[in-house]
Image (spheres, rainbow, N blue to C red):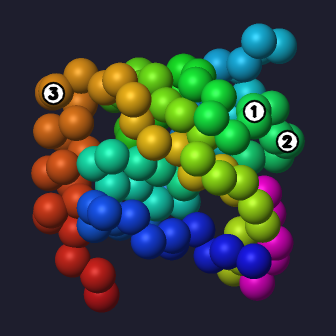
């Protein structure tokens, strides 16, 4: 099992943002678990994509801001969060605007764990 904090090349921070995954069958909602400037872990309720599939997501760090991203599914598996097991997927950003990447980078850089 995985706790959603897979080792990547970039520092990551825990985040609890809404996310919408755009699928061929319509939009499905999920929640973010953690993020870095190059990838993201998402908690979802059903798996719609295979490893290597590329798809669109919309990150919603706040009510007033949305970040559209094209990403590629890198892994999926069980996540242990708050003593419960959920489905999670790891995605790598393949297309993101420089300004949105800068927003994510500044959030990661500013994060100070308690």
Residue 65, numbered label: none
Q: To which residue does mark 3 refer?
A: 99
Indicate the secondary structure of the residue bearing disc 2: loop
Residue 46, numbered label: 2
Q: Mark 1 or mark 3, which is nearer the start of the sequence?
A: 1
- As drawn, is 16 to the left or to the right of 95? right
Q: How many labels were placed on the picture?
A: 3
Q: Mark 3 or mark 2, which is nearer the start of the sequence?
A: 2
Residue 111 percent across, percent down from the top left = 22, 68
Q: Are marks 2 and 1 in contact (CB under 8 Å)?
A: no
Q: Are marks 2 and 3 in contact (CB under 8 Å)?
A: no
Alpha carbon distance from label 3 to label 1:
27 Å
Alpha carbon distance from label 2 to label 3:
31 Å
Q: Which is more toward the observer, 31 or 102? A: 102
Q: Quadrant of residue 77?
A: bottom right
- As drawn, is 63 to the left or to the right of 99? right
Q: To which residue does mark 1 refer?
A: 49
Most common secondary structure along the magenta stretch: strand
Q: Are marks 3 and 1 in contact (CB under 8 Å)?
A: no
Q: Which residues are magenta?
A: 83-87
Q: Quadrant of residue 29?
A: top right
How packed mark 1 is, by other alpha carbons closer than 10 Å (few <14, some 14-19, many 20 or more), is some
- As drawn, is 7 to the left or to the right of 10? right
Q: Tell us which disc is closer to us: 2 or 1.
A: 1
Residue 43 percent across, percent down from the top left = 67, 53
- As drawn, is 55 to the left or to the right of 68? right
Q: Quadrant of the N terminus?
A: bottom right
């Amino acid at each position: 099992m995985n706790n959603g904090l897979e080792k990547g090349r970039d520092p990551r921070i825990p985040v609890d943002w809404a996310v919408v995954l755009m699928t061929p069958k319509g939009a499905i909602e999920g929640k973010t678990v953690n993020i870095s400037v190059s990838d993201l872990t998402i908690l979802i309720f059903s798996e719609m994509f295979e490893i290597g599939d590329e798809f669109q997501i919309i990150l919603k760090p706040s009510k007033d801001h949305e970040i559209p991203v094209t990403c590629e599914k890198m892994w999926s598996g069980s996540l242990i969060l708050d003593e419960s097991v959920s489905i999670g997927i790891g995605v790598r950003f393949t297309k993101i605007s420089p300004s949105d990447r800068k927003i994510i980078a500044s959030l990661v850089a500013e994060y100070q764990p308690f």
